[in-house]
Image (cartoon, coloured by chain):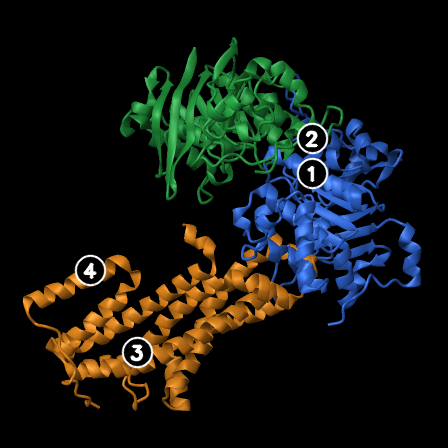
Amino acid sequence: MARPGPMTRAPAEAAAANGPLVAAEAVQKYFPLRRGLFARRAPGEYLRGVDGVSFAIPRGSSLGIAGESGCGKTTLARLLLRLITPTAGRILFEGVDLSTLDGPALLAFRRRAQLMVQNPYEAINPRFTMEQALAEPLVIHGIGTREDRLDRVIAALAQVNLRPADAFLDKYPHQLSGGQLQRVGLARALMVDPIFLAADEPVSMLDVSVRAGVLNLMKAIARARHLTTMYISHDLSLVRYVCETTMIMYLGTVAELGPTEAVLASPKHPYTQLLLAAAPVPDPGRPLPEITAPEQVPTPIGPGIGCPFQDRCPQVMPVCRTVPPPLVFVGPKHEAACHLYGPH
Amino acid sequence: MALLALEDLRVEYRTARGTSGAVDGVTLEVREGEVLGLVGESGCGKTTLGRAIIRVLPRNARIAGGKIVFDGVDLAALPEAEMNRYRWRSIAMVPQAAMDSLDPVYRLGDQFTEVLTVTGALTRTDARRRSLDLCDLVGLDRRRLVALALRPRLLLADEPVTALDVVVQHRILKMLRTLTAELSLSVILVTHDISVVAQTCDRMAVMYAGNIVETVPTPDVFPRPRHPYTMGLQNSFPNLLAPQETLIPIEGVPPDLLHPPPGCRFAPRCPFAIDRCLVERPALRELEPGRWAACHRAEEAGALRIQSQEAERWRVPVP
Amino acid sequence: MRSGSVDALPRPGQTWAGWRRAAGTLWGVLQHDRFAFAGICIYALFVLIALSGDIFAQLVYGARPALTVGFVAAFFVALIGTSVGIIAGYYGGWLDAVLMRLADVAFGIPYLPFVIVLVAFLGPSLWNIVLTMALLLWKDTARVVRAQVLTLRERGFVEAARVLGSSPRRLMLVHLAPNVLPIALLYGSLAVGWAILTEASVSFLGFGDPARISWGYMLQDAYISQALSGGAYNWFIPPGVCIMLVVMAGYFISRGYEELLFPRLRRR
């Protein structure tokens, strides 16, 4: 099998070297509700996982994506890593449309974009020792010789503070704690020297006392290696800890996008305001606030006319029922998709 | 007056590799109408403690000693048949996987009614009416409220909001507070999330490896933790509203309860451990009225709090 | 074929002390080894020798087709079932739909009539029976393996492997196959039992290979000779017990293999 070298760049792509590393252009991913060989699908019978999302992640920066479960954040991550392909729209990675990648070019992309999965207990094949798990990326991409690989694996373990590395080489996943496994997950993602790292709720299954260790490690490694990162979480305080930019998603759409501190200090979209009000804070002096938003279970199924947040919005207006709000600037680099700030 | 008082409660699990003291000498009080937050890492024994109170332990677990005094009666000494009088009627439980606590095959109303009638407390019609009342009271999230169907006096809520979205979580916590006020209900809220405790509970008990290490009124715990473990938890927990700080993890892992360390169980991970901590187990002491901590150096807590802010100290050498 | 005198073989001691000694030894073995079923089997054989040398000879000879059919058929059932299950579960979509409809068809075909018709076409032979079993019995394994693959596919390590650039072949062979192996082995060992039973039923119905003695053939022979009503238990119980023991042995071997292969199970 021909081994691809560093990503082969066409001249046009070289121009994109200064642009954002990742750019999503009106990305849409619909999932058919009825499956089967001969199923016919009416237009409404789709689940709108991601519904027209555009954003860019500049090189070396970190984007945090927050929202309720089912808002499409994981689907978006899978799209960006080309685990699935969009129904419509384009995702550009270093200026190249991901859906055009194939064969060696796709394999080269796989060396540049990596993932840290949510559940540490499922992150490693239970039949693999840590050595096998960490050597696997090297085997797939044909990096290094057999002896060389062991050295790399040991170095990788040391890099994520699993010392002495020898003690971990022959361990199986069930012999390690969640925090240790998540570190191995990080180390495995770094084996191929990626430039983009997506992390999908990497600490949500971990105990509070070990979360900080994994997050600090991620931050330190991202800084040292100039990684571009994307961090997905339902916990705004963790997004704030890791990311410069924050994107709030609601039912597959972008509700608000901007510098983290700006979004959290002066949230513009009613949904962001709701999330912030409801978020628990370790401060006994602050009692649980009153929330006025109507109780509604959001559904990503159906025709989807108007603003996706209309049924739960305390400030809903007639226009929200018919016109989906576009993203408008509400501050420096700070955008919100809400008619309160639009021309209406 | 205390509605529930645990005195030196011990729960043991028999495993293939030996006996593990999942709850090892817990002394704790829950007052009338109070919400007590029970906090700790996974595996620290908080779920076991909750289940021991209502005596629904797994087969290989048993109460090995101590008292569970509820309203003047020692539940640990009651025969099984009499214990049933207390379950549901006086003490109710919301189990961890609340999503699974209702049978999807039956309608909600029928399930409420079943709880109410099977226990023999009400007739069918009354039960029906009561369940409707309850539904009105709690709004959308009815499923969690089966536990309240019989107007118990103590509610054990085991991670009731874990894995829920913040908005739903907020609604349930809010509802919990309303209910405690309206029904003068006492609650033990088991959780790993100290921010949930901060905003909902009157008092907080911190558990570590089967021991209670600190019990304090909630308003006091965050500015002035007295146990190094609580300090560590506070360091590792992000606060959305406070200025951004570097989080400090507690390195290491909780001890194996089959072979717990002889002294303080937190000593191997504690940056302030002295020789005494390694050999002598600290007792839970009342330092000031209502403020209890199990630490040999609790008197120095003021100084330790300042030192605990330094990340370097928490780098415990790898064993 | 009623030949094969075994008079030359030794008989166990018929004294009371001899029986007691034998029972004591057996009990000792049973206490120490779960594979002591083998011991029971040997013991049973000796009893049979004592009872009827003729039946013993048939029993020994009949083991050959039973084991051949059992293991060969089980091997193919597990192989086809696992491959189909993994491919259907991994790729999903139309391939999954087609393969699973095929499985439905296999489910729908009544087994014995199918075997009888096929044997009638191809001629009665052991290998044709094996062939029909391979053609029809893979469906259970395939279904269960597919279900397992569907949950495995959502696991983090499969996703991570895809992100790392694993080829579908590598994913299926390195990540999925080892993780469905326990269940495939279990179904494989169950298939051993099925295959032996099926061979027995086909022979019992008289569609087996007439040139070979098998345990099923013995049962049929006993049935036709009205051994059941005649109270000739020593005629039909031994082949029945042997079928049962081999099926159990298949199961225990797969369990042991599983423990050997995946040490994690040993802790429990």
**Residue ID at (27%, 79%):** C215
- Where does label 4 land, which residue? C27
* Disc 2 and disc 1 in contact, CB within 8 angstroms: yes
* Disc 4 and disc 1 in contact, CB within 8 angstroms: no
Q: Which of C74 and A274 is in front in this view?
A: C74
- Where does label 1 land, which residue? A215
Q: Distance between the residues labelled 4 and 2?
A: 64 Å
Q: How far apart are marks 2 and 1 (CA)?
A: 9 Å
Where is residue A92 shown, x and y percent of the image?
83, 55
The amino acid at mark 3 is Ala
Identify the image quadrant of residue A164.
Answer: top right
Could you confirm whether marks 3 and 1 are on the same chain?
Answer: no
The chain whose colour is green is B
**Residue ID at (36%, 18%):** B69
Identify the secondary structure beneath mark 1: helix
Where is residue B113 shown, x and y percent of the image?
40, 32
Q: Which of marks 4 and 1 is in front?
A: 4
Identify the secondary structure beneath mark 4: helix
Disc 1: host chain? A
- Where does label 3 land, which residue? C200
Q: Chain A is drawn in which colour?
A: blue
- Where does label 2 land, which residue? B247
Q: Chain C is drawn in which colour?
A: orange
